[in-house]
Image (cartoon, rainbow, N blue to C red):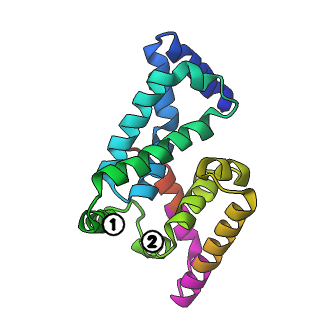
Amino acid sequence: MNSDIQNHLASIAKGDVDAMGALYNSLSIRVFNYARVITKSKEMSEDITHDVFMQILEKAARIADIADPIAYIMVITRNQSYDYLKNNCRSAELLENTYEESAASFPYDSLFIWDAFSRLPANQQEAVYLHYISGFTYRETAKIIGGSLITIKRKCAKALSQLRDYFNQHEEENCNEYCEDIARYNNQQPS
């Protein structure tokens, strides 16, 4: 997949508009969902997705030469998301409303999973999303987040343990439904 992305980026650098559309179709869901994990807001994530792709358009030639352009684009997404929060959520009230909006419009069919996921610390949510939902390796996740490989493995293990405890504590019996919910969430198109 990285070679396809590199080819799209090289074509974008040469002015190929169709390549930008193909790149957007390939990565927009991942960018949007990762921004949403960080911001907890659909609207903010849409803005961030736009900003990320504008940045990709400006830097396509440089990004095409990077060994792992997808991981790099996810770093751009992470940085844009935190910058957006820092610049637009100065008040705790606005950030609290963002969390409430996210719970109300969370794409999972079951709010049970959202409840469990939202109880994880933000850094664990980010690691779980990147590794288990987006499919990045631990090493790629560490590179994107900026932590060590061991730290990411520990965060993921601790998060899974907390999720397992939460599910067991609430006596939910059909975990297959929740796995399907995660898969649907990962395939959600930004609007």
> From this viewpoint, which residue is outermost toward the right?
150
> From this viewpoint, which residue is outermost toward the top?
14
Which amino acid, mark 1? Tyr
x, y percentage for residue 125? 53, 64
- The answer to whether 26 is drawn above or below residue 102 in the figure is above
Q: Image quadrant of residue 102? A: bottom left
Residue depicted at x 29% and y 69%: 96
Q: Which residues are magenta?
A: 163-181
The local crowd at label 1, few if under 14, some if 14 to 19, many if 20 or more residues have their Cα within 10 Å, is: some
Circle 1 residue: 99
Question: Residue 118 bears which disc, if any?
Answer: 2
Q: 129 left or right of 85?
A: right
Secondary structure of residue under mark 2:
helix
x, y percentage for residue 34? 48, 51
x, y percentage for residue 162? 59, 79
The answer to whether one can see residue 161 in this image is yes
Residue depicted at x 54% and y 64%: 123
